[in-house]
Image (tube, helix red, strand yellow):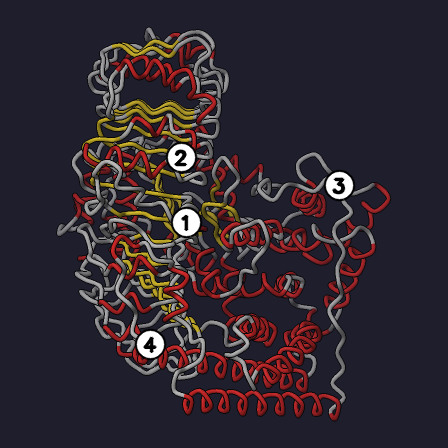
């Protein structure tokens, strides 16, 4: 596909044109003429790409391929010029040492060294310009020849239509596109009956859902999996998606990880575990099958396996799960080919639930909900016509219905709707499409309809694992590093990237997995059929080369390489890849980051020849150090490593003068980094175990700073603000704080007006986090450690907190040792939706939630072993949805006010033996929770 290639080159040309005039002397005109030529091609190439995809004209396919190759050649020429000029400048002018106190201007530092104003050697300066000019002219000549060939071979094409904005006024919101199980009622009833019918089948039984791809198997299973009856019935529920070539031990490890997380159900989501270990700590170095069997024993469980599983792997899973006659179930979600295991179930087996396609009525109902929302509908004068067209095009296949709805959501009714319907119906009636379900055609149309910038963003999912949720923050950072995100006045690049992601969700090309209270997308996933489509398109366009085998035989011309391999102990990546811009690898095994299960690969020789690298994102690499040569890769924007054995970073790390994101995870200890690193002005996100310097440089672009410790801070009175020039920070996580840091940290917080997420951990934490006026935008706060000050200060805090923290939504506290008056203050927070008070957070045997307190609280977690009595006054927590009590063993009864909380949907009691008998039917506290759909007790 040539369109994404041209988009990339145009962005590169814009970057080059933005340089000083001296840099482009004698070259600027050539570059601008190239840009103009590419912009004209860009307007015509979309239609040609569509026709190439339909394979109705071989001449068009050749024209598209040749245009793409020339675009790649142009990108290589520009990148080579930037690389050679930058390396020469560094050799002539090595980076200066960080001045004392970091008082100099980072901007002046950058332009004195980073990019060449002009090389000092006049001869080399002329040579660089001459070489670039010659290459650009040759590229323009090739483009002229390609255009001439188009005319000679009568290759007709037309610009893509400029679609208008939708005229519909009742469209569903982008985040209201839930997976409706339209037409699945009878299947849902059958599935619930098979899962819950202990009287009929008490032994562990195999339940299965089968059907063709995209029929809605996973959607049905997920709906029933999350329904209150099933959540109440099973003590443990796990859901495992089988990736290609998965090993039995990986499947068992993932089930064990989820089961352990539920058995250790902590309100902190495991961030501060009781024993300091992770979910897999008990399985380390042991037979995972035996560990899983032991943990499941004595508990009724539901294990969902989504994907085709081999008989041998099924036998391994079956042997690892106890059969105690308590009604446990294994649910297999697969296609017809995966049903072979049913004959080897080795126990009770229900008849498979086989899904069929939707009826015309249910097809339109699903379409209507996806386009207009739960209550909206198509205007009556058009309804009958589109009712029939949608079914004729999709033939009742749910994924096709959803994708078609995503296309029409952005179209004007009826003109553009008619154009889309006519195009798809005409394609359906073609002889070669008679036996096709049309799903591929609809996906192609949806992809063709994407704006230029969204096409590259969607194709990037081809580099991600199949059927695995993708962290949205990571994805957007990668998009920014790749240059896919266009700047927009008044918004950060990350905010623009979030908008791109929401548009892909709105178009039903991407599924929303999770979002926060403020509408920020947290995780997404792509349907496996759409993922396969993205991989095919990316392969055809030379956009991403994807591999999942041991030997990665990527061609030397590969520009982006994705390796997803969790099955082998060694992956060879030794061949030179001189054109490589991006490498995204996932070698992590079984859903864990433990070093002992990382894939072993220390051969990074391919990096040395990849001078154009922009993105390195490798998870699960056993590596002790990075090569020094990484400092010569001046194009790198994103460097992400998940590696538990990394011992040090090379001193050349400070030469990555375009670095935006440095993400180092998996290591427990601290890493050293040169002081000059903190002077790279392009830094946007640093997530790494670093010690902060006395004072940061002019990091005005820095938004994320996680994993760092302030050991080098100057804690003397009047020493200044160590974060003073990082005023655009949005997210900060600091650990290792002591009493000496309190004053300095308070000074730093006063300058962070844009901060929305804050985590502080250490011996002593400043109470000022609740009183500093600058933190008015703070949404998420997590405190682990004793807070300074005394109870007398809390009286003053109570007066202003509702005004100073109007946006605080999530609050977690550990070991803070606050009293009742402080809790009363928290009850005044107007936006607080999630509160967790865990070990040592509260001092006292009695806890009271006052009248009308916590008006917006949805989720509450209490883990206070010393607590004996908990009182909730009338009107407090009126909106509470989820309540978790974790090891409050001395609390004997639930508050009476719970009986009147109509919004309460789930109550979880973890290791509270005195309470269990009281809440059972006939117990003293049963009336308080009998209206709650889900009540779980974990012993």
Q: Which residue is mark 4?
A: 90
Badge 2: residue crowd in 10 Å (few <14, some 14–19, many ≥20)? some
CA separation, marks 2 and 1? 15 Å
CA separation, marks 1 and 3? 36 Å
Asked whether the beta carbons under mark 2 and mark 1 sit within 8 Å of each other, the answer is no
CA separation, marks 1 and 4? 27 Å
Among the two numbered marks 2 and 3 on one chain, the one whose residue lies closer to the N terminus = 3
**Circle on res. 703:** 1
Q: Residue at x 32, y 36 (%)?
A: 747
CA separation, marks 4 and 2? 42 Å
- Mark nearest the camera among 1 and 3 is 1
Badge 4: residue crowd in 10 Å (few <14, some 14–19, many ≥20)? some
Q: Does 425 sit above or below residue 154?
A: above
Among the two numbered marks 4 and 3 on one chain, the one whose residue lies closer to the N terminus = 4
Instruction: State the SS at label 1.
Output: loop
| Displayed quadrant of residue 566 | bottom left
- Mark nearest the camera among 2 and 1 is 1
CA separation, marks 4 and 3? 57 Å
66 sits to left or right of 297: right
Q: Which residue is mark 3?
A: 169
The quarter of the picture where the N terminus appears is bottom right
- Mark nearest the camera among 4 and 2 is 4
Q: Does 406 sit above or below residue 453?
A: above
**Circle on res. 661:** none
Among the two numbered marks 1 and 4 on one chain, the one whose residue lies closer to the N terminus = 4
Instruction: State the SS at label 4.
Output: helix
Badge 3: residue crowd in 10 Å (few <14, some 14–19, many ≥20)? few
Q: Residue at x 51, y 71 (%)?
A: 538
- Nearest the eye: 838 or 238: 838
Q: Does 859 sit above or below residue 512?
A: above
Among the two numbered marks 1 and 3 on one chain, the one whose residue lies closer to the N terminus = 3
Is residue 918 among the parts visible in the rendering? no
């Amino acid at each position: 596909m040539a369109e994404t290639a041209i988009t990339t080159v145009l962005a590169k040309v814009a970057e080059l044109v933005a340089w000083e005039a001296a840099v482009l002397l004698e070259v600027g005109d050539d570059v601008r003429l190239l840009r103009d030529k590419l912009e004209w091609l860009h307007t015509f190439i979309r239609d040609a790409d569509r026709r190439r995809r339909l394979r109705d004209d071989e001449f068009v396919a050749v024209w598209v391929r040749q245009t793409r190759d020339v675009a790649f050649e142009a990108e290589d020429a520009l990148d080579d010029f930037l690389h050679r000029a930058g390396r020469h400048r560094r050799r002539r002018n090595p980076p200066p040492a960080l001045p004392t106190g970091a008082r100099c201007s980072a901007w002046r530092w950058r332009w004195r060294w980073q990019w060449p104003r002009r090389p000092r050697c006049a001869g080399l300066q002329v040579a660089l310009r001459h070489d670039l000019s010659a290459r650009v002219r040759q590229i323009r000549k090739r483009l002229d020849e390609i255009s001439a060939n188009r005319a000679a071979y009568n290759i007709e094409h037309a610009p893509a239509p400029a679609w208008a904005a939708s005229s519909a006024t009742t469209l569903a919101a982008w985040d209201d596109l839930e997976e409706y199980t339209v037409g699945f009622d009878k299947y849902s009833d059958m599935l619930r009956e098979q899962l819950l019918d202990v009287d009929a089948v008490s032994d562990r039984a195999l339940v299965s859902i089968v059907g063709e791809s995209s029929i809605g198997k996973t959607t049905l299973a997920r709906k029933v999996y999350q329904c209150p009856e099933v959540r109440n019935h099973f003590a443990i529920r796990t859901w495992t998606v089988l990736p290609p070539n998965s090993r039995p031990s990986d499947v068992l490890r993932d089930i064990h990880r989820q089961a352990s997380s539920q058995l250790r159900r902590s309100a902190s989501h495991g961030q501060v575990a009781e024993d300091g270990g992770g979910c897999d700590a008990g399985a380390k170095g042991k037979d995972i099958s035996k560990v899983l069997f032991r943990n499941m024993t004595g508990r009724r469980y539901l294990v969902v396996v989504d994907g085709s599983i081999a008989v041998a792997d099924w036998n391994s899973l079956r042997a690892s799960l106890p059969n105690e006659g308590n009604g446990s179930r294994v649910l297999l979600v697969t296609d017809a080919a995966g049903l072979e295991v049913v004959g080897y179930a080795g126990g009770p087996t229900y008849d498979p639930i086989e899904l069929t396609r939707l009826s015309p009525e249910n097809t339109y109902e699903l379409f209507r909900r996806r386009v207009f929302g739960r209550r909206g509908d198509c205007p009556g004068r058009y309804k009958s016509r589109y009712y029939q067209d949608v079914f004729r095009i999709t033939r009742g296949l749910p994924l096709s219905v959803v994708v078609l709805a995503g296309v029409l959501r952005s179209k004007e009714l009826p003109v553009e709707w008619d154009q889309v319907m006519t195009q798809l119906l005409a394609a359906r009636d073609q002889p070669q499409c008679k036996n096709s379900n049309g799903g591929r055609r609809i996906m192609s149309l949806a992809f063709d309809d994407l704006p230029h910038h969204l096409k590259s963003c969607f194709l990037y999912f081809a580099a991600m694992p199949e059927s695995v949720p993708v962290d949205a923050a990571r994805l957007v950072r990668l998009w920014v590093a790749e240059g896919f995100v266009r700047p927009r006045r008044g918004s950060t690049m990350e905010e623009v990237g979030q908008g791109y992601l929401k548009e892909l969700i709105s178009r039903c090309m991407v599924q929303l997995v999770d979002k926060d209270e403020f509408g920020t997308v947290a995780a997404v996933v792509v349907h496996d059929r759409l993922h396969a489509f993205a991989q095919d398109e990316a392969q055809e366009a030379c956009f991403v080369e994807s591999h999942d085998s041991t030997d990665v035989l990527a061609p030397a011309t590969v520009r982006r390489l994705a390796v997803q391999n969790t099955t082998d102990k060694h992956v060879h990546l030794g061949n030179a890849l001189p054109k490589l811009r991006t490498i995204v690898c996932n070698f992590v095994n079984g859903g864990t980051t433990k070093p002992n299960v990382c894939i072993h690969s220390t051969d990074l020789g391919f990096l040395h020849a990849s001078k154009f690298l922009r993105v390195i994102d490798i998870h699960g690499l056993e590596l002790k150090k990075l090569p020094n040569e990484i400092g010569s890769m001046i194009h790198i924007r994103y460097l992400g490593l998940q590696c538990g054995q990394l011992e040090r970073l090379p001193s050349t790390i400070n030469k990555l003068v375009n670095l935006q994101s440095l993400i180092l995870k998996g290591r427990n200890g601290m890493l050293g980094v040169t002081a000059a690193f903190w002077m790279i002005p392009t830094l946007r996100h640093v997530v790494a175990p670093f010690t902060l310097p006395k004072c940061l440089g002019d990091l005005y672009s820095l938004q994320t700073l996680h994993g760092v410790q302030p050991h080098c801070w100057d804690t003397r009175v009047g020493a200044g603000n160590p974060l003073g020039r990082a005023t655009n920070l949005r997210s900060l996580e600091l650990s290792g704080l002591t009493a000496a840091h309190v004053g300095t940290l308070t000074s730093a917080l006063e300058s962070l007006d844009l901060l929305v997420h804050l985590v502080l951990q250490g011996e002593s934490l400043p109470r000022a986090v609740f009183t500093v006026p600058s933190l008015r935008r703070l949404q998420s706060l997590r405190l682990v450690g004793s807070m300074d000050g005394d109870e007398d200060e809390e009286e003053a805090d109570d007066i202003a907190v509702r005004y100073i923290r109007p946006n605080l939504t999530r609050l977690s506290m550990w070991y803070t040792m606050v009293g009742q008056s402080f809790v009363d203050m928290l009850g005044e927070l107007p936006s607080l939706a999630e509160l967790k008070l865990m070990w040592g957070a509260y001092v006292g045997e009695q806890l009271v939630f006052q009248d009308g307190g916590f008006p917006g609280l949805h989720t509450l977690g209490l883990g206070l072993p010393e607590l004996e009595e908990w009182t909730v006054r009338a009107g407090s927590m009126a909106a509470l949805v989820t309540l978790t009590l974790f090891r409050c063993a001395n609390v004997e009864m639930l508050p009476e006010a719970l009986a009147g909380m109509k919004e309460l949907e789930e109550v979880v009691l973890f290791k509270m033996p005195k309470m269990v008998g009281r809440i059972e039917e006939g117990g003293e506290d049963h009336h308080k929770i009998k209206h709650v759909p889900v009540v779980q007790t974990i012993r």
